[in-house]
Amino acid sequence: SPAVRTKESAEIIVAGKDIKGEHHDLLWSQSNENRAPDLQLALSLALKQTNHDTVIIVTHIEYVEDLPPLLAKHYSFSCPRQQVRKGEAVVLILDERMVFHLD
């Protein structure tokens, strides 16, 4: 997401690593600004990143809780929807079909 707080979070995650980021307006959801989430478009965007070993999605609550189960389903494993609070993350290791929660 191009929102300031998500850019700051992404910078912390990739600090000291050779990782380039991309910002996509699609991943910026905010109910008070008429930015409704579009999970199918977000899933499509994530699935286009197949030329990378690692994809880190830093976004808003509407996506962070609902997008991981969709990604997992696409890769034929289960990831139950989880409540995620600010500062937490859901990590999917797609090639190993693993999911875990970071807090």
Image (tube, helix red, strand yellow):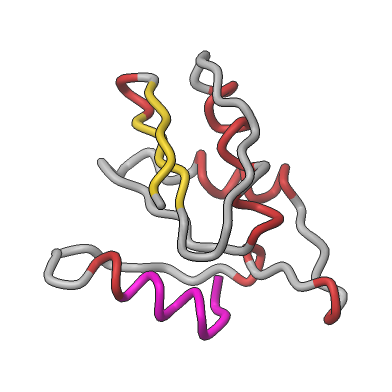
| Residue at left offset 69%, top offset 49% | 41
Q: Choose between 66 and 87: the one closer to the eye.
A: 87
Residue 96, quarter of the rendered image: top left
Prevailing secondary structure of the magenta residues: helix
| Total numbered labels placed on residues in the image | 0
Q: Residue 21 in the image: x percent, y percent?
A: 35, 68
Residue drawn at (56%, 68%) of the image: 24
Q: Quadrant of the N terminus?
A: bottom right
Q: Quadrant of residue 13?
A: bottom left
Q: Nearer the viewer, residue 17 or 48?
A: 17
Q: Residue 45 in the image: x percent, y percent?
A: 56, 49
Residue closest to the eye, 54 or 45 = 54
Residue visible at 32% across and 23% down?
95
* Relative image position of residue 98 (x, y in whole percent): 38, 24
Q: What stretch of residues is rendered in magenta?
A: 1-11
Q: Is residue 75 magenta?
A: no
Which residue is at 49% across, 71% downward? 23
73 sits left or right of 36 in the view: left
Q: Residue furthest top?
A: 76
Q: In this view, does 92 lie above or below 54?
A: above
> Residue 86's image quarter?
bottom right
Q: Where is residue 8 in the image (x, y as percent from the top left)?
A: 40, 80
Asked if residue 13 lies left or right of residue 62, the reply is: left
84 versus 25 height, above or below: above
